Amino acid sequence: MQNPYSIFHTYHFSLSTLPTTGYVPRLADDRIGTFMTYYQDYTDFGSETPYVRYINRWNLKKKDTSAAVSEPVEPIVFWVENTVPEEFRAVVAEGIEFWNTSFEKIGFKNAIVAKQMPDTATWDPADVRYSTIRWILQPGQTYASGPSRANPFTGQIYDADVRISADFVRLIFSQFNNSVAPVSFDGRGVERPGKIQPPVGPHNVTFDNNSYEVAEEAAFGLECVLASSSSPAVQDSLKKRYVYEYLRWLVAHEVGHTLGFRHNFKSSAIYSMEQLADSTFTRTHSMSGSIMDYPSPYVAGRGKPQGHFCAPIPGPADNWTVEYAYSDWGTGSPEEEKPRLEKIASRAAEPQLIYATDEDTYSGSMKSVDPECNVWDLGDDVIGFCVHKIGLTRDLWLRALGDLERPGVRYPRIRTAFQFGWRSYTDAATWAPKFIGGIHGSRDHIGDPNARLPFLNVSAADQRRAMKFMQDYLFAPDAFELPAELLNKLAPDRLPDFDGSNYTVAQLDYPIHQQALRVQTAAIDRLYGPFIIGRLLNNAVKYASGEDRYLMVDMFADMRKGIWAEALSPKSVNSFRRQLQLAHLEKLIGVYLSAPATYPSDARTLAANDLNLLETACTRTAATPGVDAMSQAHFKEVVRQIQAAQGAQREYGSTFLIGQ
Ligand SMILES: [Zn+2]
């Protein structure tokens, strides 16, 4: 589209010779989290598959192959670009060399070396001969990424340039109040401070977009850290340590991608919260199986000793991946290495080595079956962590925001801090439903020691616990009741910015009901989505013989009894619950009137059953003395909608027939 703006583009074309000599490609394995280079080989018709898959890795070789520990012939060198602010150069270098402890375990000393790019350097960071950590100034853009280039025939990595946007750290430091629009809505329909980053396209070989949500999670963590003390001196000290640890983790994570390593989003599930609270433990065991997870920083909360915020060393799964990818056996061909690689990979069932990656997590999609495979969770008890995180939020909302209210602080600062609290609820609305019809997954191979089956139903007890958590923390009548005084402080920023936020702000006053409903409907949409309903049907026949089962009928009954408690034992219903009940009703009617291909027939039957029961209960409650006028009108409207649905047309494929 034409417009009056102009922009100068400068293009650099770099041509380089592919490294081809002295490198032995390494065969890939689906139990190990590495990026891969693959092609099809049609010269052998007898092979199981035409695919040949190699891992991506640097050509790291021992200088002294007979020594137990040796320096490499050529270390992997990362230059800290001279645009990195001086105060962060040391921690960036620490993040680069973070991985050396893993390499030491396989006999490499100083495998990775950080160097400082001098101001007098005559080379450009885009030069393929230099791998760098770059500091990019892109106002309002919060991201870090770790792309690399690899030989498309062998997987040999020969160049990598980690990019960190300056605003990433700025946003953590300033809790987002300097450079982002005050309010917008995220993909999950929840108001959040700041802008939504556009999706970034895939990179040629390896890619990570450690983006807005990482910074937002970090900023939420910092708000909770600051809330844990009202002493400015203690707050300042905690803040410095927090940013330091977070940045070190961030650089190490991105460098991990450039070493050829993929995400491991299940690895945060190996330690308990008690272990994570103990810095003596985390100093020697790390805080998750892998730093290639997106962990939530550990925040102890008010009155509790604070351990590490972020992992101080690589985790056991990191060491394992490094062992697979970089062990130097002096072998001459990929085939020759097979037995050694199999020995390493066959440890997959060891509890500390659990691995699940992006396509197991599918971001927040319910395609992801495993409730322990999440981003931003922490510890071996996801529901327990939801309770912990919501506890931090309640403390932030109900106490710490009061501390913020002092001369010199403007109200938008309070609204911004308040907004971060929703993270704990949106996470809970994403994670808890995954237990219902959930499945624990593994990648173990047949014959691995202690090998698990690829799929194992989540226990009925854990599914019931997740359901109770949602009823208590997301759907309860008082779940989002907050003091009027607090709600009336939540003012947006009125100062102008480059984005015209004063005009695009969703609304000036605070939409508490809409916010609450968005969290609740996020959970309801997931629970009644075709993925969970379909799994509940299928999982029923996948429990071990005699095992306690949680079935589709249990899910429908628990939701009906929890959300409609006021209709089932007649009493008035408050405004949060009225809108929740209507949202649930809409979902039930949607399932009831759905096309047969969308839901299993049992789901439509159970929806019809719920509608019948609710029609009876709401008719009675609407006529019960003492029920207030608004509640009476509400229950009458529920009955009207049910009766309308019962007489409505149901969709059968592309044709409409009369229902009932
Ligand atoms: Zn990443």
Image (cartoon, rainbow, N blue to C red):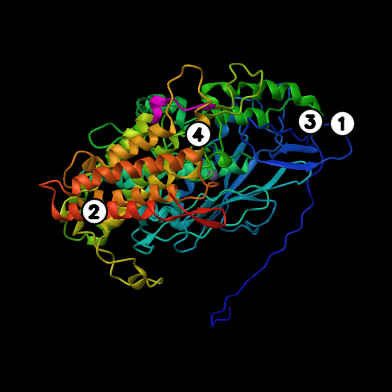
Q: Looking at the image, can residue 417 be seen?
A: no
User: Image point 50% across, 40% down: which residue?
Assistant: 601
Viewer-side label of 1, 3: 1
**Which amino acid is tagged 2?**
Lys
**CA neighbours of label 1 inside 10 A, class few (<14), some (14 to 19), many (20+):** few
Say how many tags the image has: 4
Quadrant occupied by the N terminus: bottom right
User: Image point 45% across, 25% down: which residue?
Assistant: 284
Q: If you read the primary sequence from the N terminus, does the residue marked by circle 1 or circle 4 appear first?
A: 1
Which quadrant holds residue 106?
A: top right
In space, the residues marked 1 and 3 are separated at their CA atoms by 18 Å
Label annotation for residue 636: 2
Quick check: marks 1 and 3 in contact, CB under 8 Å?
no
Q: Nearer the viewer, residue 118 or 506?
A: 506
Q: If you read the primary sequence from the N terminus, does the residue marked by circle 1 or circle 3 appear first?
A: 1
**CA neighbours of label 2 inside 10 A, class few (<14), some (14 to 19), many (20+):** some
Q: Nearer the viewer, residue 612 or 530?
A: 612
Which stretch did the figure color magenta?
456-463
| Label 4: element kind | helix
Label annotation for residue 334: 3
Q: If you read the primary sequence from the N terminus, does the residue marked by circle 4 or circle 3 appear first?
A: 3
- Mark 1 highlights which residue? 46
